[in-house]
Image (cartoon, rainbow, N blue to C red):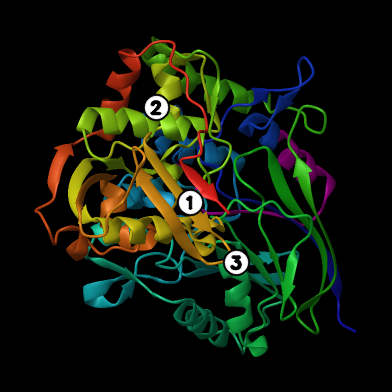
Amino acid sequence: MGIRKRFTILHSNDMHGDFLAEMRGEEGHLIGGLSLLSGYINEVRSEEKNVIYCIAGDMVQGSIIDAEYKGISTMEIMNYLSPDVASLGNHEFDYGLPHLLFLEKIANFPIVNANLYITQYNKRLFQPYIVKNVDGFDILFIGIITEKVMDMLKTDNMLSSFITLQEAASEVGKICNAYKNDDIDLTILLTHIGFESDKELASLLDPAWGVDMIIGGHSHTVLEQPAIVKNILIAQAGVGTEQIGRFDITVDDDTNSIVDWTWKLVPIDNIHCQPDEKLTAFIDGFKDIVDKKYGSIISKFARTLTHPERTRETELGNLFADAIQETTGVDVAFVGSGSIRKTELGPIVTLGDYLALFPYDDSITRFTVTGAQLKHAFAGFMRPENRNGEGEYYQVNKGVKAVYDLAKHEVVSLALNGVPIDDSSRYSICLQGYHYKNSTVGLQLTNEELAQLEQPRLLATSGRDVVEEYLRNHQNVNAEVEGRLQYL
């Protein structure tokens, strides 16, 4: 038996600029926020000998503070948290590739990614891996993302990613093989591909490569316990800063393997954590500037409207789809569920609240499609395989009623204002720019198919402006879930 040592691995993912604690439940009960999260990390670092904190992608995008500073505020605050290593998520690209490279330079911690390449030169864009020596044990971290979640790459022809999980797996093998002569005691993949894809990736890895653990993100999965595939532990920690994942493991340096482990999802609240007051003051410096700029009230709803999950019809989804449909006059407005970033809004809506909830300043384009294509699009995004946290789901405007039969695996009814959609008739639809570029992902229609009947027409350079103007001119609005998207 070799030397055995204990390690504590803390992990976050999909933090999305979730800087501030929220008050919930009993009076004074604070949940989430980076001050409490930092307090917990500081406490663990002081209590345990060998602590590693890692982040599995999507640090940026999702708050007004992040958007105002284009991620720079987030990176400065991440430097304060001082993770040992982080990997890229898809939203790290939201402000563009040149800006991401700038953010990487601001980071005081390594950002690893093994499978993003500058196409023309077949050179990796980022440091593919890092070996951290902790208490005499070498720990290898490899960053992985696949094109499945890298839809932003389609806007940049200079870059490419390995397209399939199989190719990502072979890249892991390539790096692990380079270390066969070295004594790597623990190998961890930091992925941002979704929990189901993590399990599939684990099944493709050769046990001889020695991968022990996959810490992932993207699908916002909340776990009771990690999955185990081919003896590889697979975990992620939901979304935001309301919780953190914690592994306590024992590693044997003779077998280079985990011989004992426990995992739990630790709630981040003021019952379990002490706030980091210095970080609170640091964040307040950004918040005060943003509050002055974005504190004006733009609308008041009849009540708080919600968007509790992405993969079904929601109140806010209906409101936003109605706003875009009324403004553009199309038959069907498809609004990406994932572009609505918070679970509730109102009744008082400030400009800051609105921009934090709907942060993407994206275009709106109109297309003409046949009824048959429209049915195909609804079948594409309503299918169960697209509702696992890794697909693209849509909210639609009033007058639309789509019924999907889960047993038959098809749309059995699609009507507009009470009239069934006719396969050979023409209908106008609109999409946000991101969803136009990636129309095959959710709607299963190519850009060429969308342009077959009529030249696509740009209706607005900013869908965010369209919805904001609608809200300013519609006070005391209400929205309900009406059965626009139904499942049998």
SS under mark 1: strand
Mark 1, residue position: 403
Question: Which of the pair 229/480 is nearer the observer?
Answer: 480
Q: Is residue 334 left or right of residue 303?
A: left
- Image x and y of residue 335, in percent: 36, 41
Q: Residue furthest left?
A: 455
Report crowding for label 2: few under 14, some 14 to 19, many 20 or more residues within 10 A (C-alpha).
many
Mark in front: 3 vs 1: 1
Question: Which of the pair 208/350 is nearer the observer?
Answer: 350
Provide the residue span drawn in magenta: 39-60
Q: Is residue 29 left or right of residue 322?
A: right
The image quadrant where one finds the N terminus is: bottom right
Report crowding for label 3: few under 14, some 14 to 19, many 20 or more residues within 10 A (C-alpha).
few
- Image x and y of residue 104, in percent: 40, 51
- Residue plotted at (75% across, 80% down): 256
Q: Is residue 401 left or right of residue 366?
A: right
| Residue 150 at least partly seen | no
Q: Inspect the image, locate mark 2, and give the three-letter code of the amino acid beneath it.
A: Leu
The image quadrant where one finds the C terminus is: bottom right
Mark 3, residue position: 196
Picture quadrant of residue 182? bottom right
- Image x and y of residue 421, in percent: 31, 51
Q: Inspect the image, locate mark 3, and give the three-letter code of the amino acid beneath it.
A: Glu
Instruction: Identify whether 211 is placed above or below 452.
Output: below
